[in-house]
Image (tube, rainbow, N blue to C red):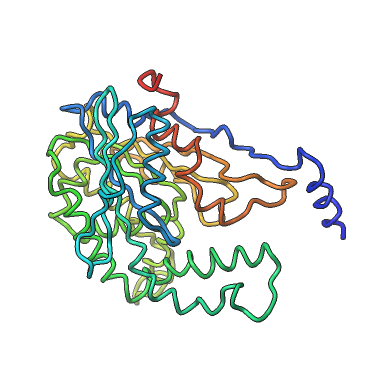
């Protein structure tokens, strides 16, 4: 009852919601897509989009491209007929778009891998609130149906026996998406949650075949970063190895391993300094997101910036809808503006 009364008042009166990180707060400066297009050889850059957990389709790619295009005040991208699949058996679609700016061109390839896990997740459909004979509270139902029955299973499937097959198919998609790339064109990567882990793991698996892709990386945007959480699945228990002390020996996570491989390869031609701009967007109320520890990636040729955002309203300082907090990053106008125009806002976006 004590909570019900203020919630009822909140429903009747304005001013009971807040978005503490809108505008977003960055702890450093970084360039945007417009800057890379303007300074790249030939004024053309490649952009790779990889979605995270939860069901996605080609519409996600179109909505993301539309948000970026709007932030850049660009000409509308091509029609949805540009959607292509590598092969029906692989289950990964590559959505190709081009955003044309006065400074140059963004050649976008979006990897839509969601259908790989769809058949397995259908086993949980009997638990959806619309089918369950029992009654769930409305907020519980929204969280269970979206996060627990649709999103979290993607991470469980990937960390289980299907991991190898997912990486094999992702490797083929990456090769297909990058096969026509110019060797001196910078590669800008926008990945979300589980998609970042799948991408980094796959690049490491590909070894020499992925080296040119890793070397070209100049801009890495991670929304809803889950690397610290998912990296736990790649570690042994303390003392599990005979003869070693029972201490936690933290191996390089997949992001750090990719950065090490990038540093070990030929001098990257992706920027004048060869440094990688790494930007992590996190909503503090996103239960599945973690900021990046800057010191963990020090000395690896990377400039790390954390950006705090609000993806949805916080009610009475008590709650932000968990599903909206985790899934709304690239639809957040603050995120789209910063990715497109950098921070502080580039004069190239004026």
Q: Can residue 260 be seen in this snapshot?
A: yes
Q: Quadrant of residue 133?
A: bottom right
Q: Quadrant of residue 199?
A: bottom left
Is residue 316 found left or right of 234 in the rendered image? right
Q: Is residue 27 above or below residue 175?
A: above
Location of residue 20 in the rendering, given as x and y in whole percent from the top left corner: 64, 38
Foreground of the two, 307 or 117 = 117
Q: Can residue 196 be seen in this snapshot?
A: no
Q: Quadrant of residue 117?
A: bottom left
Location of residue 56 in the rendering, given as x and y in whole percent from the top left corner: 41, 58
Please name the residue shown 29% across and 34% down the image.
99
Is residue 70 found left or right of 301 in the rendered image? right
Location of residue 297 in the rendering, given as x and y in whole percent from the top left corner: 36, 44
Foreground of the two, 105 or 21 = 105
Please name the residue shown 27% across and 42% down the image.
97
Location of residue 82 in the rendering, given as x and y in whole percent from the top left corner: 25, 48
Locate the C terminus by quadrant: top left
Locate the N terminus by quadrant: bottom right
């Amino acid at each position: 009852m004590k909570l019900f009364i203020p919630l009822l008042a909140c429903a009747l009166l304005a001013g009971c919601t807040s978005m503490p990180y809108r505008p977003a707060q960055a702890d450093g400066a970084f360039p945007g897509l417009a800057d890379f297009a303007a300074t790249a050889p030939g004024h053309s850059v490649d952009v790779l989009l990889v979605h995270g957990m939860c069901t996605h389709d080609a519409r996600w790619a179109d909505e993301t491209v539309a948000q970026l295009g709007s932030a850049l005040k660009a000409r509308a991208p091509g029609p949805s007929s540009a959607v292509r699949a590598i092969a029906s058996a692989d289950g990964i679609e590559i959505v190709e778009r081009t955003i044309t700016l006065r400074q140059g061109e963004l050649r976008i390839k979006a990897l839509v891998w969601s259908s790989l896990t769809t058949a397995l997740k259908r086993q949980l459909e009997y638990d959806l609130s619309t089918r369950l004979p029992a009654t769930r509270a409305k907020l519980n139902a929204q969280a269970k149906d979206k996060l627990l029955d649709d999103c979290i299973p993607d991470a469980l499937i990937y960390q289980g026996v299907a991991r190898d097959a997912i990486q094999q198919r992702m490797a083929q998609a990456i090769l297909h998406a990058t096969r026509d790339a110019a060797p001196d064109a910078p590669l800008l990567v926008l990945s979300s949650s589980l998609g970042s882990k799948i991408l980094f793991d796959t690049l490491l698996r590909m070894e020499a075949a992925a080296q040119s892709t890793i070397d070209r990386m100049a801009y890495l945007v991670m929304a809803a970063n889950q690397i610290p959480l998912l990296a736990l699945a790649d570690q042994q228990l303390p003392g599990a190895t005979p003869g070693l002390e029972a201490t936690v020996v933290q191996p390089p996570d997949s992001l750090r391993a990719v950065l090490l491989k990038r540093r070990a390869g030929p001098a990257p031609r992706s920027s004048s300094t060869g440094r990688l701009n790494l930007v992590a967007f996190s909503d503090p109320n996103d239960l599945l997101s973690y900021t990046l520890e800057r010191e963990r990636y020090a000395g690896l040729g990377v400039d790390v910036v954390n950006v705090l955002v609000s993806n949805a309203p916080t009610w009475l300082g008590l709650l932000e809808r968990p599903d909206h907090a985790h899934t709304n990053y690239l639809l957040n106008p603050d995120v789209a503006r910063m990715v497109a125009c950098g921070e502080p806002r580039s004069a190239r976006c004026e």
